Image (spheres, rainbow, N blue to C red):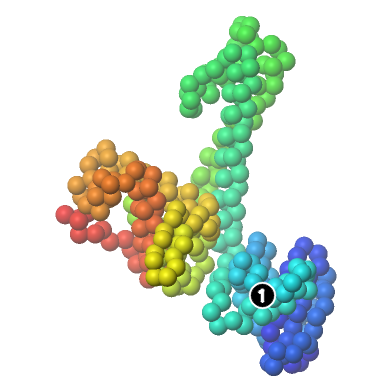
Amino acid sequence: MQTVTTIGLDIAKSVFQVHGVDAAGNVIVRRQLKRRYVLPFFQKLPPCLIGIEACASSHHWSRELKALGHTVRLMPAAYVKPYVKRQKNDAADAEAICEAVTRANMRFVATKTLEQQSCLMLHRTRHLFIRQQTAVINAIRAHLAEFGIVAPVGRNGVEQLLNVVADPGDKRLPDVARACVATLGAQLQMLKARILEFDRLIMAWHRSSEASKRLDEIPGVGPALATALVASVADPKAFRSGRNFSAWIGLVPKQHSSGGKDKLGSISKQGDRYLRSLFTAGALAVIRYAKIHGTKHRPWLTALLARRPTKVAAIALANKIARMARAMMARSERYREPVALAA
């Protein structure tokens, strides 16, 4: 065990797989470990390189193993898969991780801190409540439509429907149906209160983070996107360029190029869907403001809107905003308005 230099660790809920090799690539250890034996096993090893596939719990294990003196590198699972030989199982996965972590051109994922993971949990929980709110609203509309009761789209329309439910004198709705929809209405009010509470928590986290407040100065970036970026990107310098960062989010075109002929398609939609949706929403807000107040100070956006549809322009603008955000995070700089905007 003293000669182990590199380990591939395939983590799971209960049973972990370890594949360790020496400096010459000879297999020294190949075994399973139950969860409670993982840290005691690595405590007995001299400092070595440990590879783990990046997933929800990998950041926890990375922090724990680093505290023991090991060097831990997290890798996207998609980049490890090509190293799996034939059939997929835990032992083959651990061996592939062990091989992939030693590749010179492998891309690694920076380990997130406890604060970053806590902020991401705020966003994920709030997003879950928003999805539940949408589901409840759709259920209320669908149930009442069965009795011929409809209302305009939007927040006011839902309020009109709930007023109908609260009126016992309205005989269009049977008592049993009224009780069901009233329960859904109470659930909707509870979800709205929870969403408002999490909005306040996110705003408090935003005010406590200097990096988040700097990102908030970019047009199209608000507290939600700024905090999500700071929490999601542990090391902005891990991206070689702004385009790599945009590609990680999924805001760049897919390529089908060959023979020196460039062929670009629609955006790849890879990476974090939540971040991509926030960037797109921010870009649409900038375009909407520009259409209302004029685009003469934004020549690039003006020319783009003249030749492309609004949503296509929004994706291009979101790409531009993402590149600016990456540069500001990597250099710890504040937002500087372009000369065309400052004029």
Front-lying residue, 200 or 284: 284
Dot 1, crowdedness within 10 Å: few (<14), some or many (≥20)? some
Badge 1 element: helix
The percent coordinates of residue 317 (x first, y second) are: 35, 53
Residue 74 in the image: above or below residue 24: above
| Residue on which disc 1 sits | 83
The percent coordinates of residue 12 (x first, y second) are: 75, 65
Residue 216 in the image: above or below residue 79: above
Q: Is residue 296 left or right of residue 34?
A: left
For image coordinates 77% across by 69% down, the residue present is 87
Q: Residue furthest left?
A: 343
Q: Is residue 188 left or right of residue 267?
A: right
Q: Is residue 19 left or right of residue 229?
A: right
Residue 219 in the image: above or below residue 165: below
For image coordinates 82% across by 73% down, the residue present is 33
**Quarter of the figure with the N terminus:** bottom right
For image coordinates 64% across by 67% down, the residue present is 77
The percent coordinates of residue 63 (x first, y second) are: 64, 72
Give the image quarter of residue 215: bottom left
Front-lying residue, 182 or 240: 240
Front-lying residue, 27 or 224: 27
Give the image quarter of residue 246: bottom left
Amino acid type indicated by mark 1? Tyr
